Image: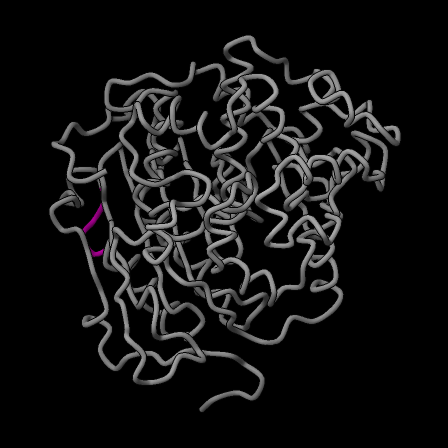
Amino acid sequence: MRIPFITKFRVPASLEAVTSRRAAAEVGPREVGVKATAVEEIWHAVERLYQTAMHPAIQLCVRRHGAVLIDRAIGHASGNGPHDPPDAKKVRATPETPFTIFSAAKAVTAMVVHLLDQRNLIRLDDRVCEYIPEFGAHEKQWITIRHVLTHRAGIPNLPPRVMQLEQLKDPAAIVRILCKAEPTSRAGRQLAYHAISGGFILGELVRRVTGKDIRSFLHEEILRPLNFRWMNYGVGRRDVRKVAINYFTGPPPLPPLSILLERAFGVGFRQAVEQSNDPRFLTSVVPSANIVATANELSRFYQLLLNGGALDGVRIFDPRTIQRATAEQSYFEIDLTLGAPLRYAMGFILGAQWLSLYGPDTESAFGHLGFTNILSWADPERQVAAAIMTSGKPLLYPQLYYAYDIVRQIGSACTKVRRSTARKPVSLPRVGP
């Protein structure tokens, strides 16, 4: 029975028919200390979320002790959205399908900035206007790089014209708009999630310091050495059609949350979903919002951090750089944009004992969420690096519990590892990225 005003897609009769897995990449659960039945419970949780008809495609990759435990997808990357005609060409989602990760990009952007600090090109407590002098207008001269990384810059709301699709091709114009913007609070005073604005500032910082745009710098300094296929800001025009389509689903967005998000995004909720599929968005650089990746690659990025900055014999970060990046900065303050008590580091959202994005008893975990029900994280105590991708974009919906149940099942399956007995990452021939 369909509930009025709830936007859903058509769930196929056979889940197995729309399920894909990279079986050759998945290790035996016992090799990494996990019960086989626990792995199936994790996947059953994914199937239950899929059956809510909120997400036309879901992708999950879980690494444990450095080995791939799960790398699977369910649903369709395109052709089975709520308003797609029944005879539309349906393209199955696979573990190789790239998704736009939205705000989960913030953690990657943050690590680019931390790499600059590691190389002594900046200091995190430097004022932004030392590198972008015009940014100091309207008393923004006190905003530091740390303030931007921790959502304390006082400029959480985005002027509407910034996210006009044609505007995205002119980064210099976006920077000029942000430089002229007036802050809503004094730097460092209030914790308020900067959904889009902070990324543009950090992207310009990278350009001023290195002489390269942040897309090129990320590719040259992190992605190419580690042989990533995706994981950069947007895609080339020839790859646009390969990216999973995002669909508005769920109940209609209502105030006050819809108003808060519109101020933060610079566009309305439904418009944000529609714009995310536009080639102009997918080929631009939006440092806080438009990295395109697979769950496998995003979890691999977190494995890099979990390993202390080295992966497959290549060192990118110093261990102390990661320790600094993931150190708590907010101490459970109420986020004035999201209205929730969250623990922030410099670019990451931290876990907690109870109110945690990553399941219960995950105080050591760090990661980031993405719009909406996208999640990526590392849990050092469980030696887990994981990513969940979803193509449905509901704001709030009754079955949200099923999304949380996935991370709960992962935490339950991958028990904590004592530091003295923690295994070394499993060394296996690499299958794909």
| Quarter holding residue 76 | bottom left
Residue 35 x, y percent position in the rendering: 20, 49
The residue under the point 42% across, 18% down is 317
376 magenta-colored: no
Nearest the viewer among 401 and 7 is 7
Depth check, front residue: 305 or 228: 228
Task: List the single residue furthest toward the right.
Answer: 138
State whether residue 14 is above or below residue 432.
below
Q: Position of residue 396 (x, y in %)?
A: 59, 67
Q: Identify the residue shown where x is 58% and y is 65%.
A: 395
Q: Is residue 137 left or right of residue 125?
A: right
Residue 46 position within the rendered picture, expressed as x and y whole percent measured from the top left: 34, 62
Q: Is residue 35 magenta?
A: yes
Q: Left or right: 348 with respect to 333? A: left
- Dividing the image into 4 quarters, which one contains the C terminus? top left
Left or right of 88? Residue 347 is right
Looking at this view, name the residue that lies furthest to the top: 120
* Residue ID at (30%, 84%): 87
Residue 274 left/right relative to 425: right
Task: Establish if 83 lies above or below 275.
Answer: below
On the rendered image, what quadrant is the N terminus found in? bottom left
Which residue range is magenta in the image?
34-38
